Image (cartoon, rainbow, N blue to C red):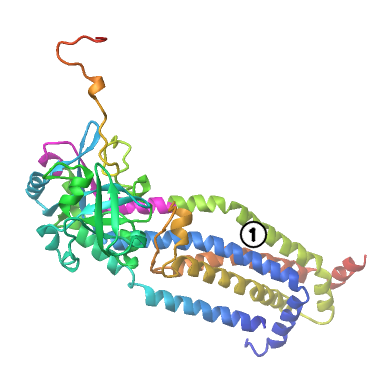
Amino acid sequence: MSVKTHLPLIAWSLRDLLRHPVENGLLGLSLFFLTLLCSVVLLFSQALSSAAEQILADAPALVVRRIGAGGWLPLPARRAEALAGEVPGVVRARARVWGTADGPFGVVTVYGWGTAEDLRTPAGSGILPPGRGEAIAGSGLSSVGTGGSLELKASSSMRFTIGSFFSPAAGLVAHDLVLLHPQDAAQLLGLPAGYASDLALDVFHEQEADALRPDLARAFPWPIQIVTRDETIGLYEAGFSRRSALAYFMLVPSILALLVIVVATVRKQIGRRHEIGLLRALGWTGRHILLQQIIKSCMSGIPAVAAGILAAYSLVFWPGTTWMGALLFGWQQHPPALYLEPEGIGLPVVEIGVLVFAPYLTAAVWTALMSVSADPQELLDREYM
Amino acid sequence: MGIGLTGFVGAALIGMLVDAELRTGRYYNEPAKLVQAIGVSELALVPSGRNLRHPSLHRRAVDLRYDPRLPFEVLHEAGLLLAPGSKPGK
């Protein structure tokens, strides 16, 4: 079975499609938008889950927070580091000074960074630590400009000079992050001298991080809350899945629209059964008619579905796309420019293609089969009765 | 025309897959380095200060009124305390 032998049939199918250009155009447009909506939701969820997993792979294995009756409490940095360091399996304990502060365009996350311990990490050596009164800011604050003055308010109000900015490509982590000198950060956040917000731990065996919880709980003289990296990544994935599920609920009308398209296609085909009767009277076999229906469905459906997938891919993975932050994550101004990697999208793309195209093709083939099995005379008679 | 359109879209789909392959492993190095250096545990997808920004902090079992997301507000408790020896209402 070669394409050459079926060229007349393909040409006939195309001619048949062009006989109803508006009808087929609208059908294609409906399939395009339906594919676009479904693909955006699926690709968005897949891309963000993958980003969380890959970017946070090097995040602290465990984060320990001191808690009291009122909630979170600062912990004494050196003592906490020493206590955690005594727990077998913990290879590195780092007290973090961080919190949130009001900035010129909304709340920002402030990190105190630049201690000798911070600079000892391989990645840390590539960042010039901020001096007193200096700040390194994320691209969300880029309108302030290098050398510009940045006023932050938390426990106290302080003014900083922006020394440099993080690259927009690091926006997934640093979009509204402000890196300050550790003492500046502590002063801004109202942390007493020698105290930290929490403790980041690296462990010898990553897989055993969860097993260290009881030892850590015993090691500290205060109640603590321990969060593992896997838990954080899991929470992100669950959050993205929940959002996708909600989006799919919102897509129920679109799915109903697909159903209407399928029903309309079937009805249209049934309405034109006399044409099939005519073709059969002219000598077309059932195989020819079935093939013609499949070719017609593929000619109108495949380009529409593929174009929908392409449009969704562009929307989600276009480098520096900002619509997601503005529309889905509640950024009022300066949404982060997202640079997402399209890893592992093959399966979702196939899923969407099958999900949208299969019902449409099935409806067309089923109608053709019904017509093929009918008597040509009966099909012709229906038209003129 | 239909064949041309199908061919064009097919080529574009192949182009998309090639583009996906080329861009994989290209964008996450920089944020990952920052995570490693600073020790950040969360993504900056949601604006700072919202619960979704710090999902691991948002535990129902713990009342986190005083957590790093808030600028260390302290309840003004003077009105709730009585000086030693004093009597209520005086």
Is B55 contained in the magenta span?
Answer: no
Where on the picture, by quarter, is residue A116?
A: bottom left
Between residue A222 and residue A364, name the one nearer to us: A222
Against A250, residue A142 (above or below) is: below
Between residue B59 and residue A190, name the one nearer to us: A190
Quadrant position of the N terminus of chain A in the picture = bottom right
Q: Main secondary structure of the magenta part?
A: helix
Residue at 78% x, 81% y is A284
The disc labelled 1 sits on which kind of residue?
Answer: Leu
Q: Residue furthest right?
A: A385
Q: Which residues are magenta?
A: A216-241
Q: Which residue is mark 1?
A: A258
Between residue A251 and residue A16, name the one nearer to us: A251
**What x and y, as percent, mark residue A233?**
31, 54
Residue at 65% x, 67% y is A29
Q: Is residue A222 left or right of residue A352?
A: left
- Badge 1 marks a residue whose secondary structure is helix
**What x and y, as percent, mark residue A115?**
12, 57
Q: Is residue A72 left or right of residue A238?
A: left
Where on the picture, by quarter, is residue A221?
A: top left
Q: Residues within 10 Å of mark 1 (few under 14, many from 20)?
A: many
Is A224 contained in the magenta span?
Answer: yes
Q: How many marks?
A: 1
Q: Residue A197, can we see it? A: no
Quadrant position of the C terminus of chain A in the picture = bottom right
Q: Residue A190, can we see it? A: yes
Against B58, residue B6 (above or below) is: below
Q: Is residue A131 left or right of residue B16?
A: left
Dot 1: chain letter: A
**What x and y, as percent, mark residue A223?**
17, 36
**What x and y, as percent, mark residue A154?**
27, 44
